[in-house]
Amino acid sequence: MAPDPLGVSPPDDTGTETFRRYRYQAHVAIPFCLRCAAGENILSVIMEHFEDVVVQYEDSWLFIQIKTRNANRGPWRLSDAMGGISSLHRVYRETANLSARYSLFLEGPVDPSDVLQELVPEKSGFGERLRNSVARNLDIDDAECESFLEAVTVRPEQPPRDHIESRNIEIMGAYAPRLSHQELQAVHQHVANELLAAMARERIMAVMPRYIEDPDALERDTRSKVEAKRLTGGALRELMGSVVRGSYLLHAGDAGTATMTQLEQKLLAGGADASTLKSAKILRANATTREFELLSATLYDTGEIEDVLQRLEVFANAAVSKHGAEAAPAPQAWSDLVLNLPAHADVLDPNRIYHRDPMLLLGAICGMSDECQVQWGSAVA
């Protein structure tokens, strides 16, 4: 079982405010997770204990420090941000030979009159005053400081703690406009919990440079500690699949098992061909995924799910009965359902349990075949 992040001792502060700051780190990482799940040039996201996030791109690495600040303390200045810059410099010294970048994410704005502005993206570059100040604070020479600052960006204006979840849900909604706010909120919560669990595991930043250079060279135990804090595209697609996969389309893979299911037996007995069996298994798998999302998120009263299943049972059995006297009723009944479900989706699925998606509704009907609620017209079935 993953450690409880609430039980992890933070470096400073106590109580509820500390946990809000702790959770903020996970929330800042979620847009990176979304892009990783969607296959957008990010291979994995690694969560360190407090403030650190590492993003693995296809051809580089990004080390992130995240700093929070109450609005009543005013905009950020270089003196306020030196703690995060110092942390990035420690990582820089270990990884300067790698293809890596370093970024400081700040909750709230930077003082427009402060030299810290020179590290914000889209700025023309940093000047001697900034370089001298940072070199003095870090106790390094000008040449090292210049090389370090060339690899650093400061990204202010990160949403405040009270609003970052809404920002993330808005971003997720752009990927999946068909999902309700409740559904997006549930996915967001699941991902945040996984990130928090990863953060609570043993710290690994000290071994990250060696992991990046050659993970296979690490001892198995050390490598496994990094992997426990690393969320890959595959893992994130499991968490965010309903957001990034778009409409529920037929999967390319085979959703079946070695043992023939009740669904397959009934369709075969009703005269269905191999193509219909394959489609039925895939649609059934998609509908099961949708049902699992709803039940695990506790978004809907189970009575609403039962209601749509009862409607589908009546609708499907009516289609099957229409062809009950035929020698092979299943192909005709299947065809009728494919043709007629789109026109009746709003009545069959009034609460959008299956997004009123005809293919998901057909998948739910296939699921009821496994439970012997829908036959396919054959006495043998």
Image (spheres, rainbow, N blue to C red):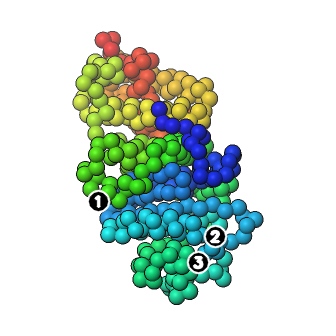
Front residue (pair 158, 321): 158
Circle 2: is it few (<14), some (14-19), or many (20+) Cα within 10 Å? Answer: some
Looking at the image, residue 323 sits to the left or right of residue 301; the answer is left
Q: Are marks 1 and 3 in contact (CB under 8 Å)?
A: no
Query: Is the residue 243 above or below the residue 90 in the image?
Result: above
Residue furthest out toward the bottom: 128
Q: Residue furthest right?
A: 72
- Whether residue 217 is situated above or below residue 254 in the rendered picture: below
The label on residue 80 is 2
Q: Amino acid at mark 3?
A: Leu
- Cα distance in 3D space between marks 1 and 2: 33 Å
- Which residue is the site of mark 1? 213
* Whether residue 69 is situated above or below residue 78 in the rendered picture: above
**Residue 324 location, x and y as percent?**
37, 18
N-term mark: 1 or 2: 2
- Nearer to me, 195 or 152: 152
Amino acid type for the residue under numbered disc 2: Asp
In the rendered image, which quarter is residue 166 located in? bottom right
Q: At numbered mark 3, what does the secondary structure look like: helix, strand or loop?
A: helix
Q: CA distance from mark 1 to mark 3?
A: 32 Å
Position of residue 379 in the picture relative to residue 181 (left or right): left
Judged from the image, the secondary structure of the residue bearing numbered disc 1 is helix
The residue at which mark 3 appears reads as 116
